[in-house]
Amino acid sequence: MLLAVLCGLLSIGAAASADEETAPRVVRVGTEGVYPPFTYRDPETNELTGFDVEVVEAIGEEAGWDLEFVEAPFDSLFPALDSNRIDVIANQVTITGEREARYLFSTPYTYSHGVIVTAKDTDDITSLEDLKGRTTAQTASSNWAQVAKDAGAKVEYVQDFGPGVELVVQGRVDAIVNDNIAVLDYLATSGNDQVKIAGDAGDEVLEQALTFRQGDPELQQEADEAIATLTEDGTLAEISERYFGADVTVQGGAEDVEVGASDSRTTWEVVKDTAWPMFVGLVKGNIPLTIFSFAIGMVLAVAAALARLSSVRVLDWIARAYISIIRGTPLLVQLFIVFYGLPQIGVDLDPYPAAIAALSLNVGGYAAEVVRAAILSVPRGQYEAATVIGMDYGQSMRRIVLPQAARIAVPPLGNTLLSLIKDTALASLVLVPELFREAQVTAAATTEYLPLYIMAALYFWVVCYLVSLAQGPLERRLGRYAT
Amino acid sequence: MTDLIEVRGLTKSFGDHHVLRGVDFSAESGTVTVLLGPSGSGKTTVLRSLNVLETPEAGIVRIGDASVDFAFSPDRRAVKALRSKSGMVFQAHNLFPHKTVLGNLIEGPVQVQKRPVDEAVADARALLEQVGLAGREDSYPSQLSGGQQQRVGIARALALRPEVLLLDEPTSALDPELVGEVLAVIRDLAAENWTLVIVTHEVRFARDVADEVLFLDEGVVAERGGAEVLTDPREERTRRFLARVLDAR
């Protein structure tokens, strides 16, 4: 496993290898789910919907695809496509020269142009030229980030559009460059009157299309044929009219966009309605991830600690390298190596196993030194007593040393466990649905950031509190022999 | 009668310091051998070589039919066989703190010797009775006094049914008022003809129980003989040592 991680580190920089597989009948669609009205969860039903979702559903039906949606942050979508986690991105991906060099695009299904969003009382930004030297908030891999940079703006990176708007409102950044449709929808949905559209970001028309891997021309061709048919019979126009009151699937259509009514629910209702999906995310995501990762991590930790204490030089060296790598690299990077990197060398894990693998390795690396210190705290006489009653190494570890070390290790390992519980919030970046992801999804659709994030924090706090309550009795039980 | 224990030519050094410079001795079955000597004389190293807690550089240790020749890198099985011949009582008792008194006693018999639990428990109860601790089966070591702990340590060593019992300064870590109860138990063992090898500073006790006394100094056996070594030593250095030890009391 350690070697696999090392190989992953080495090969992460290597070029993506083209996928040789023929187009599968099951087509996995990557989409954000937090970018209304294009891709979001319906706040009433919690079902994935939106303009892009409906368009790709219509295309899939026409082309005879069996669709499987995978929700992930925008910045994760391209790595997911590269590593064959998904087959197509349906997420208002704008066609750019740079992207065309790496990916295949379908016929565009949206035509839009960029606008500049500022706080309502900002009056010195009305065009791209005014952005020079100012700060904007953008999603890292979005084309709008490039537009802002080209205009000479400093770019702060955010996960999606909504948090960017919050930064503008708070005055931490000056502006956002984004798609006019998305901005209009946001203003209508949120009822946010703290920001305004300050002007157009150039007069260039941008085209958004489905994105495929270079190795998947069949899929691209099937999509193009389907789009031609759906344009012909008015299906795309109908979907667009429903969302925007205009046909954005043809050039110039986006000028007349009228967006739908805002979510009428109160903050309290939003929080109440989201409590259950967040709880489900906790029970199906964070908690099983924690349990499995901690169990496997403890086995790794004991193994690494024993290797560190071993008289066999090589084992000590391997354990040192493992601990050093784990503690010296961010968990986020480890997750990305395991999930998006390793597939390039043929190690292809599903989201759950990948998240568990990365989290276990991480916990194991941190806990190894705790376990080692605990083993060292068991007096030498205990080994000698075990030896003279005839025990071998395995027996004396298992029956004499580790039970005593466990008592010493419980308080610091409690810390490790609490960290792990909170770290599972990162799992959504490798496509595992979990609690915080649910909060982000609803926050994007309703703009109720503060209450929903506080709610997510509360869930984590309650779980951690319950775990720390269990620590006392466990310590007493392990220490029952000491008076 | 052949000797039960035979030790020949033990040498051992820690860095430049030669702890043992060729120690020989033997002991018959049912005898009490007392190792005596100033601190650093090598007596504890000799004792710990008998069950290979220390590995001498050269020399032979034989107990019964098990022997290890340290001139060659010792074979794991031979070491295991030699260890199975003896039980050990440590200065600091080294009881397993996370196990009850009974758990300490049956750990070796059940886990290592694979004897049936019922039999090991019955044995253990008899041994606890013998060391005067009947009824303390379920106590943890931390709930016992120092003297009681050391008596459990003796019982644990006996539970393995060893041929030889090794005792490494069994009373040195005890408060003076607790020494008596532990010595009484050892005295009983001597009377029952157990083969004992004891490292101790309790000269008066040694006089009572010793069949053979080895006085070690600077890594060699400086003087050996019966208990009379302790009352009327021939060697000057033995005399000086005894004077020091007895004066300190």
Image: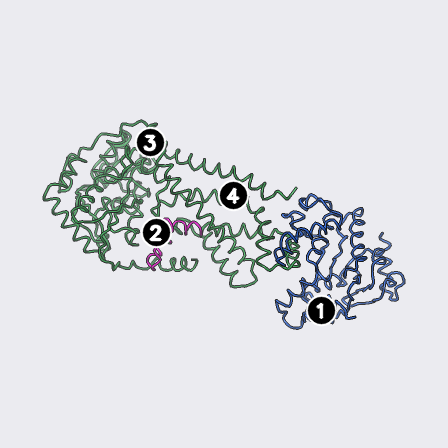
User: Which amino acid, mark 3?
Assistant: Asp
Chain in blue, by letter, is B
Asked if A154 appears above or below B234 in the picture, the reply is above
Q: Which residue is mark 2?
A: A350
**Residue highlighted by disc 4:** A414
Q: Which residue is mark 3?
A: A273
Over which residues does the magenta segment extend? Answer: A338-360
Query: Given this view, does label 2 or label 1 mark the residue nearer the observer?
Result: 1
Q: Earlier in the sequence, mark 2 or mark 3?
A: 3
Mark 4 against mark 1, which lies toward the viewer?
A: 1
A20 or B133, which lies in front? B133
Side of B234 where A17 appears, left or right: left
Q: Is residue A176 left or right of residue A243?
A: right
Q: Is residue A286 at all visible to an observer of this figure? A: yes
The chain carrying label 4 is A
Q: Position of residue B212 (x, y in %)?
A: 82, 64
Query: Does residue A126 appear to the left or right of B192 in the view shown?
Result: left
Mark 1, residue position: B62
**Disc 2/disc 1 C-alpha distance (Å):** 61 Å
Amino acid type indicated by mark 4: Gly
Amino acid carrying mark 2 in the image: Asp
Q: Are marks 4 and 2 in contact (CB under 8 Å)?
A: no
Characterize the local packing of mark 3: few (<14), some (14-19) or many (20 or more) Cα atoms within 10 angstroms: some
Q: Three-letter amino acid code at disc 1?
A: Arg
